[in-house]
Amino acid sequence: MKFLLIPLLLAAASASAQNNPNLDRDSRDPARRAAAERKAPEPAAESAPSEEIPFEKILAAPGDLDLNERFAREQIRRGDLRGAATTLERILILAPGRDRTRLLYAAVLLRLDALQDAERELRLVLARLAPADVIAEAKAYLKLVEGRRRKTHFDARLSVGYGWDDNRNSASDTDTNLFFGVPVLLNPNSRRQDDTNVMFSGGLGVSRDFGGAKPQKAFANVSYYRGEQTLIDALDLQAYSVAGGFALRALGYELRPAAGFDHVLLSQSTYLRNLWQGLRVSRKLKPRLEAYADFRREDQRFVRTPLVANATDRTGEQYDLTVGANWVVSPRDRLAFFAGHRRKYARAVAQAYRRETLGGDYTRLLGRGMFFVAGLTGQFDRYDRPDVSLSTMGREDDALVGQVLIGAPLTLLWDPLSGFTGTLGVERFQQYSNLVNYKYTNTRLTAMVTYKWGI
């Protein structure tokens, strides 16, 4: 039953993940992160193509308003929001009737967290006979301003999806397994099997801002995941999760201590109870560059089930340390890099291992709420002792995981579908191992529809 662990951990992670609407924040799941990023409307003026404009050219033509606005967009692209605000303010003094410029100015003020000034500019736009698209974007930004002023925020998410795997049971590519060092041909039921599944997940979160000179926040969330296989019922999975924590800022750092509990069922039977604690420390090195470190401790209690008689062998503590950086290359492009170390202890020493991880992903916002994500991760596992029932060799696994995902708001198809997002993804998992039992590949295709709501 070695194939059970990977889908289990993936599902548990999906059930406990939180969405974050800030492009500068980190998420180990690029699909969830990109979906969250689309919550902020994208003003046409801000997303217009930019060009490198020397400041000397601006000094030579201070009355060229179009040139100055292109320069402001270039400042935004470089992350110089305060400089862009000054440039746009100068334009509006000379030409107060430029509605799109004022909308861009309000968007910059919002990103600078100058809520009162942003609201003033937005209400000026709404008071004029501006074009319909400008009015619509101004109303969307005004909702963001009102939302940020609330001390307590609620959000909810519901997702339904369909997936296909070409090797759902993670069977060896060689159609053989080792048994006391002797290769044994697998029976037909144990060889690689493709399968489809229906997925459902939901989550509810609440956060409370305490404000002050050093903003503080408390947050909590509950989530649920369920995956039902069409053929391999042994891999039907459910996961319930609850988590909470705080966000604190001090000396230029953001600290996020958190704790939670996961309850995982495999084929309708309790398989894992997991109590975890974690700490995330992050710091802005530059306006568009953030570095972070995540530490997490888990107390994993596996439960014997009718299908996994030796599940308790995996019971033990697990420690993860991840360091990384998020770089917003431009308002539309984001790169993330991370490296991790895991130490897993287990009741059966043959199930204990060390894992090193290295990876990165690229996110591209395509406009009109659409996005593209590509990620690549390598992970390298070394087990403490051989499982002599398989081989006297120590187990060594090297895996490579590639992912591509595209998504779009369903309002592109039908206006009443506001809040709904559709995604299509493909993932390729390829694992090499010195033991043929664990050498396998799997290609996974998914289609998801997600509804999000928040105040």
Image (tube, helix red, strand yellow):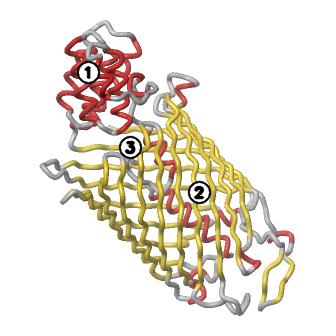
Q: Which residue is mark 1?
A: 122
Where residue 53 appears, as percent x and y from the top left, is: 38, 27
Tell whether 129 sits left or right of 411. Answer: left
Q: Describe the element under mark 2 as helix, strand or loop.
A: strand
Question: Could you give the CA–CA distance between mark 2 and mark 3, rounded to whole angstroms?
Answer: 22 Å
Q: Is residue 432 above or below residue 207?
A: below
Tell whether 363 sits left or right of 83. Answer: right
Question: Could you give the CA–CA distance between mark 3 and mark 1, rounded to whole angstroms?
Answer: 21 Å
Residue kind at label 3, given as amino acid type = Pro
Q: Residue at 69% of width from left, 64% of height from top? A: 430
Please tell me in which quadrant of the rendered image residue 66 appears: top left
Question: Could you give the CA–CA distance between mark 1 and mark 2, rounded to whole angstroms?
Answer: 41 Å
Q: Describe the element under mark 3 as helix, strand or loop.
A: loop
Residue kind at label 1, given as amino acid type = Leu
Q: Give the class, few, some or many, for how many residues have Cα within 10 Å of label 3's Cα (few <14, many ≥20).
A: some
Q: Which mark is residue 328?
A: none
